[in-house]
Image (cartoon, helix red, strand yellow):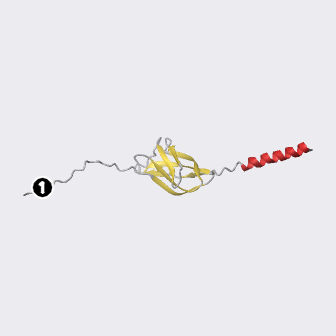
Amino acid sequence: MKKIILAAIFMTGVSVHGFAGTGTGTETGSVQGTIIDAETKKPLANTTFTAMIKKSSFQKEIVTDANGNFKLNNVPVGEQTLIIDRTGYRAAKKEGVMVKEGLVNKVDFEMIPAEEEIHQPFISPITIHSF
């Protein structure tokens, strides 16, 4: 009888421990969407972007497919501000993105090409004085 009671206590302890271990406190969701060029309206295909969450240390690289689609996994749950950045384009920001645990949120971005800066040497004006 003692063996049965000990086995029952042992099994209960394992069950409680196994159940308690499932909540890791790192609830995440996913964000997917399409990234297009704002001027041409064409998808930015096979391109690497940096995705960041404002006010967080979350930063990941995402790569678009042939149609400009991306999927970003393990995004912290809650209302987020998502920023997508790439050289040659202005950073794009979406505020109020509601990420829910285990769900996929759809967010599309239009990237505006960065203006090219023309660097010209500074030439100071010449002042001629007559004496």
Q: Nearer the viewer, residue 127 or 69?
A: 127
Amino acid type of the residue tagged 1 in the rendering:
Ile
Q: For the point 89% across and 44% down, which residue is it?
A: 4
In this view, the residue farthest toward the right is 1
User: Residue 49: x, y in percent?
Assistant: 47, 45
* Total residue callouts: 1
Q: For the point 48% across and 48% down, which residue is it?
A: 35
User: Residue 55: x, y in percent?
Assistant: 52, 55
- The part of the image, by quadrant, that contains residue 80 is bottom right
Helix, strand or loop at disc 1?
A: loop
**131 sits left or right of 78 in the view:** left
Q: Residue at label 1?
A: 128
Query: Which quadrant would the C terminus be assigned to in this image?
Result: bottom left
Q: Nearer the viewer, residue 102 or 28?
A: 28
* Number of other residues with Cα within 10 Å of mark 1, as a class: few under 14, some 14 to 19, many 20 or more: few
User: Residue 103: x, y in percent?
Assistant: 62, 51
Q: Is residue 72 above or below residue 78?
A: above
Query: Which quadrant would the N terminus be assigned to in this image?
Result: top right
Q: Nearer the viewer, residue 2 or 117?
A: 2
User: Residue 64: x, y in percent?
Assistant: 50, 43
